[in-house]
Image: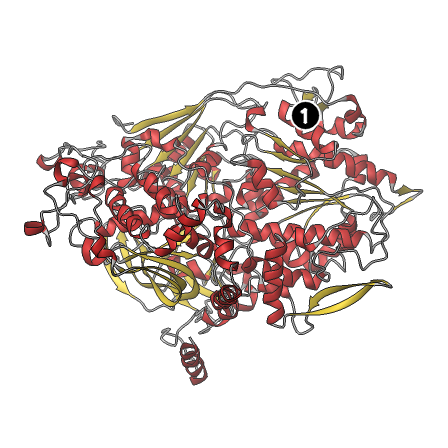
Amino acid sequence: VLQKQASYAGSIPERKERFSFLSYEKVESIPDSLIDAMGLKLFENDGESYNNSANVNSRRRTLYFHQAKAIESTLNGDHTFICTGTGSGKSLCFLLPILATVMKSDMSAFHGESQNLNSGISAIIMFPTKALAQDQLSKLHALVKNYPLLEKHIRVGIIDGDTPHLNRTDTMQRCNIILTNPDTLHAAILPGWKGIYRGFLARLKYVVIDELHTYNGAFGAHVSLVLSRLLRICLVAKYTNSVQNLDIGKILFIACSATIGHAEDHFRLLCPVASEEKVTIVQATEDGSPCAAKHFFVWNPSLVDSSGNCIDRVTIAPGKNCAAMETKKGVKWGRRSVYKKRKIMDNMTRSVDATNDMTGLVQRTHAADETARILARLVKNRVRCIAFCKTRSLAEWVYERCVNILRSEESSKDLSSLVEIYRGGYTASIRRGIEARLFKNEILGVVGTSALELGVDIGGIHVTLHCGYPGNINSLLQQAGRAGRGATSTGPSFSIMVSFSSPSEQHLWKHPKGLLGRGLSPPPAVPLNSGIISGHLLCASAEWPLMGHTSVISILNVDPLDPSVTQLCDFDLFGSEAIYTDALENILERGHIRSEKINITSSQKVETFSIHPSIEKPWSRVSLRSIEPINYSIVDLSHPKQVGVDNVICEDAVLDRIPYSRVFYHAYPGAIIMHRGRRYKIHSMSSPPPFADSTVGYRFNACNLGAFAKPSSDRYSTRALSITLITIVKQLYRVELPLDFASEGADISKDHDSCHASQEFVPVLTTGHLAGHGVVTVKRTVHGYTKLSLVNRSELSRTEITLPPMEYDTNALFIDTEASVLAELIPDYDKGVHALSHAIVAVAPLFVPCNSSDLDCDHSHYGCKHILLFDVRAGGAGTCSRLWNFFFHPDGILKAAIDLLSECPLDCDYGSYKGGCPGCIQAVPCINFQQDLSRNAGLIIAKRVLARIENTSLYKENCRIINSNIGQDNIFTLQKDSTPRRKMRQKCLDRASDLVSARARNFVVGRPSWPTDQASSEYLTTFSAIQNAN
């Protein structure tokens, strides 16, 4: 370890264990055989006390405090949310009450010599990833296999995308507990509820949502609607399947999460729970599990010479131009006569070569190489550890280097087999083999991506390595929580973030306290709007007719006055009456559903809405996670079954699968890719079709293309060169600053140094166009790649290639930043616009439900003219539409962005570095790796934009409404619905901004310019026609 190489960032103190017991009544409801199998001591006078050093098979475990509280709550019939730390035993909180209830119910259904497998209560446990489901399945099988009574009455199965369709019927008929994921619920179980899933759903009592914090943003909204559809169908199935006599009661929702804020709000937004229903929240402060102290460090790789050899130093002596510069708040504007067209600014925004005082940028060991070196050293010392990487390519890089280091020495050669890599994209057979080794603790070191960030149980980990900053504090703590888990952990654990050479991470090494900075704590983002709900209403109408305000079972022969009958209406399940009605009108106008009036009684009719017979598989029109209609399989041409043929895909030869939006960043003709320590070179690729229906979310096999690779010995790596173009194609709203505003004068010198105010020139605010909201086309293109040396990562050469872009339409908003005036006055103007865009995205969740997966900004750092924010999903998720209003609102989003820019948690002005920290503008993912940011220049631009906004008629009207005591919450409703003419205009604008009909034609996949494309003239004609239609 070199001097000052590791900077101490902080610690999480040790947590002592706290135990508790269940009440006698609750213990009586749990079968003795289940208590014995789990080895539990549930009340104070029950057997021998628990000893941490004792063998679990001979001693009974006492419940931790949080476990006892959660189990009591669930057995009392309350919805429960457990949000304690990682490794605290959250699984037991839901498994014990579920297994006890399911087992007792199944035993009651046992008749004579035969057992009716479809008579007892059932449960669904939903995981966000397949690995978590497989982990839990193996544990449950291990629990029941030595206890015949448990094995007879607790039957667990898994239904996910890897489950063959032939096996699903047997699984659903045999099992009373199913492990699954949201995608399978949406695309298989709910559409097929009238078939093999009907009996299971009719008896459903428990729904468990594991890792609830992953269900956020638009993805969280989709999952929320899937759960609403599930609750709706379960009620219908119960009264159409003759199980009314089974005492199921209401469906209970149980959730778990280790890192989350606003716990109850998030739970109620995600789960279809009525406001009057009780929800028990088990807080992190109630965590009774022991946890050793956890220490955090920021590690800076050493400097290297031009040959890539380490020079055993972390920093070099600063040169003459490296003196730290004093900074002052504010900005000096040039005198009108001298500086009007000169670039002028004080030291706060002076552009200085970063290498002058940020010496970490000078030939530093790559973070991936350093992470691999540390990992290899830990493995040599028999220390169990995990290395987390942000991307798949980085994970493969670290794994390859680590294995090579271990194999290079005779004493550690055998240890290379004890290092494994786990990431997304592997085929099912590869994943299962890796997971089996992980769960059996057969390995010492693991390299992984966020796929290992969730609650996969890998015991005995003492150190976590992080190749670069994970992106936010929650991910960091989630990853760090893999180490030092549970009572078996001895001694403190360590989390080491290995920094890249970027200015932001070098600054974090110099100011390590920012690593654990929380920054903003926005409310949960589950944006339910008519755009998202429309697709799920179409799916729901295919499952059971939509009933509006009437109970969904009103058309059945059920007494509506019976207090034992659960009454649910679609208004409550799908957002609200207003959102439901708007979405219903949308799909009704398109002819996707049809209405029918059905008699409930002799004197009462209800209008129902069912899917049109011409619409098949409506679930395929709604994608929960992805916008890509195409996947690419990376195929090994050297595989014996592939026999070198590059026009067919043999499943056994598939190395990896990558969605279309990312494939050309990793695999392109000439690219060097790594797979489990081996290097491959892409030789050819299948040509995609010119267009694809972006609404298809689950038919990837219908368009599964191939990238064909061969093993390679080339001693260089490749990196894609890409460009993102965002074009405004339709403006629906426009706000201008009146031309006569200039005569009023606009002096913002009060924001600057008073000593300069009298003599310095402050430019007048620009009039004319200020902001707009409409539709943009996002076009991402990889236009070439560069070859990089494996020795020092220097660029060897560049190669141009022609690849098809990914292009789609979405909603956006754009704000002018006075480029014609400020670009000549502020040297860091472009960096300032970039920083302000980051700040707005960072504070957006404070105003509308969204997260970084829903909203993004233009990350251009050259020729900036405006701030541009857009919905990430093709067709838009409604985020920008809702965010637009808050720009012209007192104390709105720009004011919050200014506060964020001016109050950096680290006060991180240091020399020429102005890029902020993870607590402010770096909280937003950036394709430029948090470079080209100027927090101070962004603050100046933000204040001028706010000054212009405050003088618009729309802003003044909003202030007048608030001052009239109408209320802030009613501003937008009043503006939208005040007159019939305005209502009609608003409806037309809403329809114009609705991109549902445009998504299928505007998702451009391939181009006739694709090198190997033999597209016919029909494709060219179709392309021209669609371009003309746009």
Q: Is residue 38 visible?
A: yes
Place residue 113 in its image quadrant.
Answer: top right
**Please, is residue 103 above or below residue 667 in the view?**
above
SS at badge 1: helix
- Is the N terminus in the top left, top right, bottom left or bottom right quadrant? top left
Comparing 272 with 401, the one in front is: 272
- Does the image show residue 711? no
How far across and down, in percent of the image, does residue 60 sit? 70, 21
Which residue is rendered at x = 78% and y = 36% of the image? 101
Quadrant the C terminus occupies: bottom left
Compared across the picture, whether 525 is left or right of 171 comes to left
Q: Which residue is mark 1?
A: 68
In the orientation shown, which residue stands out farthest toward the right? 112
Amino acid on which the number 1 mark rests in the picture? Ala
> In the displayed structure, would residue 569 be above or below residue 756?
below
Q: How many marks?
A: 1
Nearest the camera: 470 or 673? 470
Q: Is residue 8 left or right of residue 175?
A: left
